[in-house]
Image (cartoon, helix red, strand yellow):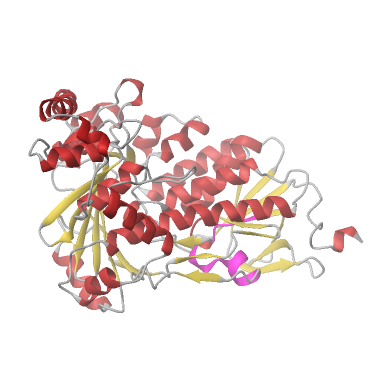
Amino acid sequence: MQQNNPENIGRKPVRRVVIAGGGTAGWMAAAVISKILGKTLDITLVESDEIGTVGVGEATIPSLIQFHQLLELNEADVMRATQATFKLGISFENWRAPGEDYIHSFGLTGVDHWTAGFQHFWHKGRQRGLASDFGDYCLELRSAQLGRFAHLPNDVMNYAYHLDATLYARFLRKYSEGFGAKRVEGKIDQVMLDAASGYVTGLKLGNGALIEGDLFIDCTGFRSLLLGQTMGVEYDDWSQWLFNDTAIAVQTELMGEPVPMTRAIAHGAGWQWRIPLQHRVGNGHVFSSKYMDGEEAMQILLDNLQGEPLTQPRMIKFKPGQRKQSWKGNVVAIGLSSGFLEPIESTSIHLIQRNLIRLMQMFPADGICRSDIDEFNTQVQREIAHIRDFIILHYKVTSRADTPYWEAARNMEVPASLQHRIDLFRETGRVFRTEGELFTESSWLQVMLGQGMMPEQHHQSADLMGDAELSQFLGSIRQKIERTVQQLPSHQAYVQRFCRAERPS
């Protein structure tokens, strides 16, 4: 019979959506599904107070702004509720070499010509002694350096947020319940399967309750209870390129004014984050257990804190990689249950958001079909591979060789897709961005140049400018940026005026 054919078993309308797990992923899922389809669906989120969430991903990227716009959320309200500050980029300290820093900002750098990117004109100017630092031609980067921020007309300023992930989930819970989503407290004891189709039919809780559904969203974190453990979807391990497998997280008092950027400070076998919120700082040390034991990593973190700890340090183990499928049968994995890349570029919440938008675009209201599943998984794999390559880049192109960890990173073989980008830039100064990729050409340039990579040549279009014309071209860009930055208020003053949050009790 048709309903016993695994290819067609889902061809019944989806009316009941069950979200397994809360946290950031679970409540983002509940928010978008309830907002868009809450009038036609029964939406239940199962969450246990006994199971903690990872909740250390407190830095975001600009795409979250669009997510909030889709949900019609007021930005100031979200920021007040989550103790949020603005983020203009990431300061990479000691990555190129000990004592050398650079910033990867969210802004575009310079002005491109239709034949060649700005970097070619900057490179020619640098050779002629006419150009200053590459970052001087980026509004967001200069604003981050000087600790300034404001919303500008026509959305000229690209930014994201630092926010409290626990408070964010709490905010989205209230929002979702306003659109009819229901929360059920309980620990999942058993995942019920239909023997004929292999589809999940319900979640049996420890108290004996059975939560039945037609479509299940797996937000159970690293456990991947539904997709991994129950559906048996295998995991692609990327630790041959991404060595880090452990993080230690702790919160501290805020010392001084919060800066509008995340700090990523490289150490001997990993790196440390500092994420300033309005009334505290999120800290952590991401490292490789192959090159450093937990006790030493803990001591490095504690020795490099600013401000008194507010929480006990928490150690989190992870395996960098991605499930071979993010959607199988009637289970869609969102967040850590689908895969995890270390938080160096703050992409975790973005990937949650992207997969939810994909799901909404392909939502199987009239029944699950194979073509949707295949297209969803193809898009997920394509996007995650691009992000993976960009993260690997930070390690591969370092000049550091002062520890075995950095020596191994510098000498590792990288995916062919990344090696091509590195070779192209090094030999020609060119970068490219295919449709749908997250990171812009400017992002690739800021990291490669920041890490010390210099191209061997530049495009001949830059040679058509004489010194006077090139100097005027570069100088006018820099002067315009400096005039704008100098008119901006301090980041702290703007936050206090725009979205000041009450100090937590």
Stretch in magenta: 216-230
Residue, far left? 129
**Residue 469 in picture, x, y percent from top left:** 15, 25
Q: Is residue 429 left or right of residue 256?
A: right
Whether residue 297 sits left or right of residue 334 in the image: it is left
Whether residue 225 is situated above or below residue 332 in the rendered picture: below
Residue at 63 percent of width and 71 percent of height: 232
Residue positioned 32% across, 20% down in the render: 153
Task: Report x, y in % for residue 420.
Answer: 38, 58
Q: Residue furthest right?
A: 1
Is 246 in the magenta? no
Residue at 46% in and 66% down: 321
Quarter of the picture holding the N terminus: bottom right
168, above or below 52, in the image: above
Question: What residue is rendered at 57% in x and 65% in y?
Answer: 324
| Residue 388 or residue 169, whichever sits in front | 388
In the image, residue 157 lies at what x, y percent? 30, 30
Q: How many numbered tags mark residues here?
A: 0
Taking 225 as reference, is 311 left or right?
left
Residue 421, quarter of picture? bottom left
Specify whether residue 343 is in view: no
Percent x, y of residue 135: 19, 40
Q: Main secondary structure of the magenta part?
A: helix
**In the rendered view of the protein, which quadrant contains the C terminus?**
top left
Q: Is residue 326 visible?
A: yes
Q: Is residue 277 left or right of residue 245?
A: left
